[in-house]
Image: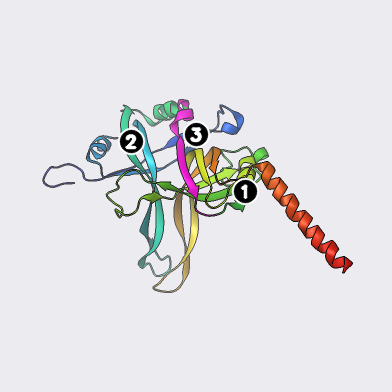
Amino acid sequence: MDDATGSYKKGQAFLIVASANRENGISTNVFYSKPFLYSEDPDIVAEMSNWKKNDLVSAKGVITTLNANKGTICAHCHEKSSRPGEVSLITPIYIETRYTGLEEKEATRILNEKREISNQVYLLGSLCDDVNGRKESTIYKDIISQSSYKGIAAYQIAVDRKYYLKQDVPTNRTDYPHIISVGAKAEQDLKCIHKGSMVLVDGMVVTREFRRTVTCPHCGKQFDWPEKVLEVLTFGTEYLADFMTPEEYDKLQAEKLQAIKNDIFTSSAE
């Protein structure tokens, strides 16, 4: 709080957002995520200072990635330490309080009714590296039906930052959100896009927690520490530049296979 004005300098809050399973249309199944909002904009902070638990609010913002030191406490010697890491959060550029003074049950009911508009993300950027394919079968199982769950494609994109962020270095003008696609979408991403491809992502924010093994710099022992991550799960991705169509990919693979066969037969003939 500013001692001179009595107003808050920073505003932060965890929001609960709801999403439906688009694989099955308007699903009665609802998936919840808990993104972190942070702002130092005076008008935004003033509005956030009025928020109470179970209020329903609207927020328009951008996904921000920051380099930050993350603190840990050793499970063995109980000493504190920190290590470099990345923090992903939402920087709001507009917020509005829609409902206030609600009980949790009523707030949840209204949020569920608005699940189709509760969690929407649009990102335009270029891939920082090639797509990484993974065969994980449990992450996001509450969102994606298991029948279409054939694997995950993961990649990071560079998104130009079109705003000034007080809490970051002024020369940092790019954010690097993590993108996840699943099933048939993942298979197509693995075929069609690569480092440098420009994409337009339509998706939703998902947050999850996992255990990371770290080594204590004081006693040298390893221990597990909870890590939170914010990602964007795609509903659809439009390929804009420097990509391959599925047909071009299949043709290229066929040509590579034929070249291998030719080498084998040529070597056998010699």
Q: Of the residues under marks 1 and 2, which one precedes in the sequence?
A: 2
Q: Of the residues under marks 3 and 2, which one precedes in the sequence?
A: 3
Relative to 246, is 29 above or below?
above
Q: Which residues are drawn in magenta?
A: 113-129
Q: Which mark is residue 32?
A: none
Q: Nearer the viewer, residue 31 or 102?
A: 31
Residue 147: name its quadrant: top right
Residue 146 location, x and y as percent?
65, 40
Residue 127 highlighted magenta (yes or no): yes
Which residue was labeled with disc 3? Answer: 19
Residue 8: name its quadrant: top left
Q: Amino acid at mark 1?
A: Leu
Residue 170 location, x and y as percent?
29, 53
Q: Amino acid at mark 2?
A: Lys
Left or right: 29, with 44 as reference point: right
Dot 1 crowding, Cα within 10 Å, few <14, some 14–19, many 20+: many
Which residue was labeled with disc 1? Answer: 190
Residue 226 location, x and y as percent?
45, 56
Mark-to-mark CA distance, 3 and 1: 25 Å
Residue name at image x 85 percent, y 62 percent: 265
